Image (cartoon, rainbow, N blue to C red):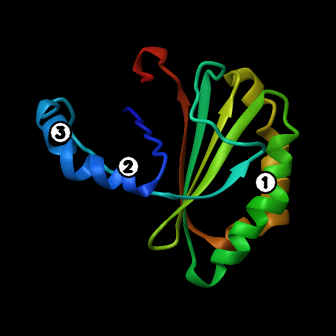
Amino acid sequence: MAHVFAFWENRVFYDSFMARGHDALAAGQAGTYNDLQVKLFEYRFDVKTGFEPRFTDADVLRVAHSQVHEDRVEHFALMQQRVWNPAMAGSPGMLRGIFGEAPGHEFLVLSMWQSSAERGKYRPGSVDRLSQRAQTEQDVAALAGDVVQLEPSWTV
């Protein structure tokens, strides 16, 4: 499995690429994958500090994709800002991240880490405690995630 993330300066550049360059690029990649899913998330806020799509200082990316109950969307976003962000920001090795929203009450949290070992320090008991405090179980209808080991040769 591969995760590919693209960061666009603004919606105009994204729309221009989709109108002018996407089809030729996609045609050149035909047959190189079995299943492809594409989602466009709009930026809502940073996780920790000003996000930059720079990967030279990170070895690991944590991605969390949440489908949130419609009546819990604002609570979910507020808890990301007040509970999860401060906890991640205070975790050794956490560099920066981004919180985005897609239509249909979908959210993506990307967090960049110096290493798997540093990210591992954040996990054990703290995630359960933070989840209870943020009422994540009441907010989230479905959650998928992955820890992605970054491949420097794929960075453009």
- Mark 3 neighbour density, 10 Å: few (under 14) some (14–19) many (20 or more): few
| Mark 1 or mark 2, earlier in chain | 2
- Mark 1 neighbour density, 10 Å: few (under 14) some (14–19) many (20 or more): some
Q: Could you tell whether 13 is left or right of 77 in the image?
A: left
What is the x, y in percent for residue 143?
A: 55, 58
Q: Nearer the viewer, residue 68 or 125?
A: 68
The amino acid beneath tag 2 is Phe
Q: Classify mark 3: helix, strand or loop.
A: helix
Q: Is residue 120 visible?
A: no
Q: Could you tell whether 34 is left or right of 61 in the image?
A: left
Separation of disc 3 and disc 1 at Cα?
36 Å
| Mark 3 or mark 2, earlier in chain | 2
Q: Classify mark 2: helix, strand or loop.
A: helix
| Location of residue 43 by image quarter | bottom right
Which residue is at 69% across, 67% downward?
77
- The residue that disc 1 covers is 84
Q: Is residue 90 visible?
A: yes
| Mark 3 or mark 1, earlier in chain | 3
Tag nearer the camera, 1 or 2: 2
- Mark carried by residue 13: 2
